[in-house]
Each structure stands twice: as C-alpha cells, then as structure tokens.
Image (cartoon, helix red, strand yellow):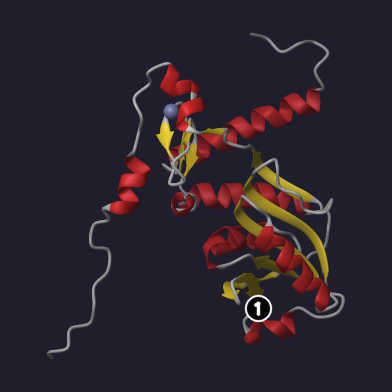
C-alpha cells in the first residue's frame, strides 16, 4: 500500500523514523511484536517491551542518545536529569552528544505513605538551582507520574525544564504541554482474554514473560559467613 498523496510529508518522515527506532529496539531483544503475549496483568497484547534490555547495546544506545541530543541541540542545557538509575545510561549518551556539554545527575524514586515520591541525592542538589536549564531523560514513559513529580521538584528549586526526551512514550500520557521528544510514540492495545482478537483467531498464547517472572533462575549470590 502506498501512502495517500495528501499525507503530510513530516508525518511520513516521523513514521519512517519511528519504524527505524523500533527496529533498533527489536535488535536489542527488548521489543517484541506480531505475537500474542500474556501480560502480568492477565491481559493479552501483540507487543511487549522489556525495559531492562533497552540499553544493553552500547552502540545503539549511543546512536539513540545522539538523536535525542540533536533534537534539543538548539537549546542550551546545564544539566541532564535522569528519572532514575535505570535511564542513566541513555542520559549519559544524550549529555555526551549535546553541544552544551551538560552534567548528568539522576533522581531516586521511592514511596512515602503509599504515595510515589522522587528525590534528588543531596550531592546533586547544588547542581540544580535558580536559573539552571534542565533536560529530563526517561527510557520508557508509561504513566508520566515520575516525570511530573520531577518537573515539580526541578521547578521548586527555581530551575527550568527545557524539555523531556525519551525512547518510548505511551501516547496517552499527559505532560502538561511540555516539549516532549520521543523516539517512539506508541500504545500497546491490551485486551481482556474474553475480548482478545488473537484468542479468537486461535493464535497460540506466549506466556514466556509471565513465566519468566514466576520462575527466575537464581540471580543473586550471598556473602558466605564462613571465611
Ligand atoms: Zn488472547
């Protein structure tokens, strides 16, 4: 199928770029598509992304970080703020490629009285002050809660959020009209088993991701007491 001639060329370009980025994420093993996947929630979907795998290929992460840095290159940035240790590798790659040569810091996530909260390690607090220009970096934005909390924190210090860069953004996320640049903007439709079109077509269900959570191989070792 060829695209309709009236289609906006920038939209086409965006679509092509998104496909390239998805292909890169697929090559890291993080992105799965054209499947029939059981989610931990019990719902079924055709697509899945494994967050912990997205930055395992250094050259890919550098390339993707450079794309985000290039987008924000016209704006001076003093600090790249990673939403947490998980997005730090990507944040490093963005900062390394940004012409302002910003420093890189990260927030920490936690719970307080059952509510999510973010803090900035005390050592970083002198780096974000009144007038500091901050670029926020996240790997996958699924709800936007952490980002919205970090924006409030940055603004509480009197600093300014220049923009938000991420690898993947669920299109349903609201970030108060902030300048967001995402390499992929996409939602996975998820279905209750009773409404699932793949079940109806008899596609075999892939339970790998749920099973993997339930039956982990021993993944930690402990210091032995005897010496
Ligand atoms: Zn199904």
Left or right of 88? Residue 201 is left
- Quadrant of the rendering where the N terminus is positioned: top right
User: Residue at (71%, 68%) from the top-left corner?
Assistant: 150
User: Residue at (66%, 57%) from the top-left corner?
Assistant: 97
**Mark 1: which secondary structure?**
loop
Residue 194 % position (x, y):
47, 27
Tell me if residue 111 comes above or below residue 9 in the rendering.
below
Tell me if residue 46 comes above or below residue 97 in the rendering.
above
**Residue 98 visible within the image:** yes
- Write down which quadrant ligand 1 falls in: top left
Q: Residues within 10 Å of mark 1 (few under 14, many from 20)?
A: some
Left or right of 92? Residue 220 is left
User: Residue at (73%, 62%) from the top-left corner?
Assistant: 148
Residue at the disc numbered 1: 120
- Quadrant of the rendering where the C terminus is positioned: bottom left
Please tell me in which quadrant of the rendered image residue 22 appears. top right
Residue 82 % position (x, y):
63, 65
Left or right of 213? Residue 84 is right
Q: Nearer the viewer, residue 166 or 211?
A: 211
User: Residue at (69%, 66%) from the top-left corner?
Assistant: 80
């Amino acid at each position: 199928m060829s695209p309709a001639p009236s289609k906006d060329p920038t939209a086409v370009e965006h679509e092509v770029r998104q496909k390239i980025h998805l292909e890169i994420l697929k090559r890291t093993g993080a992105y799965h598509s054209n499947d029939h996947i059981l989610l931990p929630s019990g719902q079924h979907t055709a697509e899945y992304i494994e967050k912990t795998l997205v930055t395992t290929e250094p050259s890919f992460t550098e390339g993707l970080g450079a794309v985000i840095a290039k987008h924000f290159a016209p704006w001076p940035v003093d600090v790249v703020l990673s939403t947490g240790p998980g997005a730090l590798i990507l944040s490093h790659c963005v900062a390394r490629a940004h012409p302002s040569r910003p420093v890189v810091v990260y927030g920490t996530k936690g719970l307080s009285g059952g509510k999510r909260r973010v803090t900035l390690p005390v050592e970083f607090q002198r780096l974000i002050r009144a007038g500091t220009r901050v670029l926020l970096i996240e790997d996958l934005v699924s709800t936007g809660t952490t980002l919205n909390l970090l924006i409030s924190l940055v603004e509480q210090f009197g600093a300014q959020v220049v923009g938000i860069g991420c690898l993947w953004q669920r299109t349903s996320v609201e970030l108060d009209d902030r300048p967001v640049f995402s390499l992929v903007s996409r939602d996975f439709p998820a279905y209750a088993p009773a409404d699932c079109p793949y079940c109806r077509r008899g596609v075999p269900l892939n339970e790998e991701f749920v099973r993997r959570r339930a039956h982990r191989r021993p993944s930690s070792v402990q210091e032995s007491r005897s010496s």
